[in-house]
Amino acid sequence: MKTRQAISIFCLAAAQVSDVLAVPEVTVVPLGSKTCVNWPSWIPQRGADVTGSFAFQVDQADDAGVNGLLTSSVEFNWTDISGTHITVDLRKSTSFAKPYYRCIDGNVHYLSRDTIISVAKDRRNAFLTFSAGYKLEPYAHEVASVRQDGVFLGALNQTTWGFHYIYSSKCGQIDYYEVKLQGLPDDPDTEPRAGYDPQFLGFMKAVSS
């Protein structure tokens, strides 16, 4: 009886922890993406629409261990397409260089390149990508009509991201998490490809560097 009671208490506690760690239900509020004013580190100056640098950071994920991690990028080579997409870097130490971004004339750029960051149109593989795609947009979140802190990444009014752990078999490259935007519609001009299902969900924020 005591053992059964202990198991029941443990299961109840586990369920409560699961509830606490679940991605919260939020109301998504578009902030507007025609200019850079709604991105972090906006620089108010005449004749220019730019921000200072900011980073992408995991927030409120089902797996709390990844919260606060920043992004990096990896190159991919599929059968008929290659490119670069943004991933979650498992190294939390600031000793490791992390890429930063900035907004210029309403578009988010990779800081060290003249490259616009977008969201891939393949709904099963909607990575943050260096290639053409949906415009990356800033959003706010509200819970019970209360505005939450932060600027959240998304597109087409979707801000929930799916994460999947990738073990790197390439020499010199560390393991990482793929991160893909969830809830996008099928794009009539984009053939969907096979892709990993997310292991857990969370949000991505833009934070001043």
Image: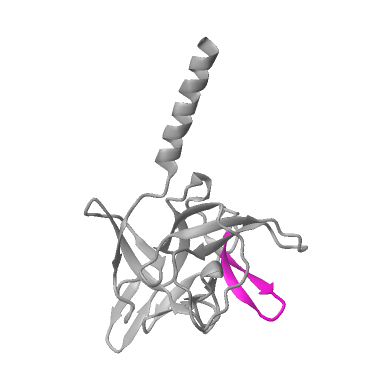
Q: In the figure, residue 46 lies in which quadrant?
A: bottom left
Is 28 left or right of 184, judged from the image as shown? Answer: left
Residue 99 shows in the view: no
Q: Which residue is more in the foreground, 163 or 122? A: 122
Residue 155 shows in the view: yes
Is 46 located above or below residue 118 in the figure?
Answer: below
Q: In the figure, residue 191 lies in which quadrant?
A: bottom right
Q: Residue 93 at what x, y percent from top left? A: 57, 53
Q: Which residues are magenta?
A: 72-88
Q: Residue 72 at what x, y percent from top left? A: 58, 65
Task: Spot the residue most to the bottom.
Answer: 47
Q: Is residue 84 magenta?
A: yes
Task: Spot the residue most to the top.
Answer: 1
Task: Spot the residue most to the left.
Answer: 145
Q: Which residue is more in the foreground, 107 or 187? A: 187
The mark total stands at 0
Which residue corresponds to the image point at 37% horizontal and 84% vertical from the top-left?
105
Q: Residue 198 at what x, y percent from top left? A: 55, 56
Colour scheme in use: one colour
Q: Residue 57 at what x, y percent from top left? A: 47, 59
Q: Main secondary structure of the magenta part?
A: strand
Q: Is residue 161 magenta?
A: no
Q: Which quadrant, please, contains the C terminus?
A: bottom left
